[in-house]
Image (cartoon, helix red, strand yellow):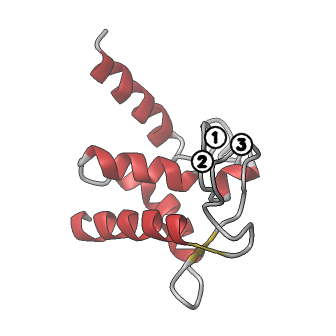
């Protein structure tokens, strides 16, 4: 099995679950997956998954539509996205102003994802 095939199998696993739902019940297994963080470190969230699919350069799969809508719904009136879930750990400097505040990195990632999705859907 090649690395590319392993990656495709992992992507299919996520797509079968719309990136954030249990395949068996449709429930969200972890609410933190719906909270956008920066830096994400090794943690999973919907925005990180969408950014991965954007980065692959592939056309958006229809199974990500609900996840994309979640991103749209989290957009603030001023056009930014918030930092929602800071993960503990050592950093060389503060990336953001703290949870609940506008996040330049989440905003960048969200805008890139929406641009990719809207241009190719």
Residue lying at the far top in this picture: please name it. 1
Quarter of the picture containing the N terminus is top left
Q: CA distance from mark 1 to mark 2?
A: 5 Å
Query: Which callout, 1 or 3, points at the residue further toward the start of the chain?
Result: 1
Q: Position of residue 102 (x, y in %)?
A: 62, 77
Task: Check the image and report above or below for 117 versus 17.
Answer: below
Q: Say which element carries label 1.
A: loop
Query: Which of labels 2 and 3 is toward the front?
Result: 3
Residue lying at the far front in this picture: please name it. 92
For disc 2, the marked residue is 40
Task: Check the image and report above or below for 9 versus 56.
Answer: above
Which residue is located at x 51 percent, y 64 percent?
105
**Label 1, residues with CA under 10 Å away: few <14, some 14-19, many ≥20:** few
Task: Check the image and report above or below for 41 versus 13.
Answer: below
Quarter of the picture containing the C terminus is bottom left
For disc 3, the marked residue is 90
**Who is closer to the viewer here, 44 or 83?**
83
Query: Which callout, 2 or 3, points at the residue further toward the start of the chain?
Result: 2
Give the side of residue 48 with respect to residue 84, left or right: left
**Label 3, residues with CA under 10 Å away: few <14, some 14-19, many ≥20:** few
Q: Are marks 1 and 2 in contact (CB under 8 Å)?
A: yes
Which residue is located at x 44 percent, y 53 percent?
50
Q: Say which element carries label 2.
A: loop
For disc 1, the marked residue is 43
Q: Say which element carries label 3.
A: loop
Q: Position of residue 4 (x, y in %)?
A: 28, 23
Which residue is located at x 67 percent, y 59 percent?
35
Q: Position of residue 19 (x, y in %)?
A: 53, 46
**Who is closer to the viewer here, 43 or 67?**
43
Q: CA distance from mark 2 to mark 3?
A: 13 Å
Q: CA distance from mark 1 to mark 3?
A: 15 Å
């Amino acid at each position: 099995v090649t690395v590319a095939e392993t990656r495709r199998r992992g992507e299919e696993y996520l797509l079968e679950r719309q990136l954030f739902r249990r395949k068996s019940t449709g429930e969200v297994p972890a609410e933190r997956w719906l909270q956008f963080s920066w830096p994400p470190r090794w943690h999973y969230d919907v925005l990180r998954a969408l950014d991965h699919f954007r980065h692959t350069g592939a056309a958006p799969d229809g199974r990500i539509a609900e996840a994309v809508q979640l991103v749209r719904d989290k957009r603030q009136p001023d056009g930014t996205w918030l930092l929602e879930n800071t993960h503990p750990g050592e950093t060389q400097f503060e990336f953001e102003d703290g949870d609940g505040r506008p996040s330049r990195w989440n905003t960048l990632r969200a805008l890139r994802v929406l641009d990719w999705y809207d241009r190719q859907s």
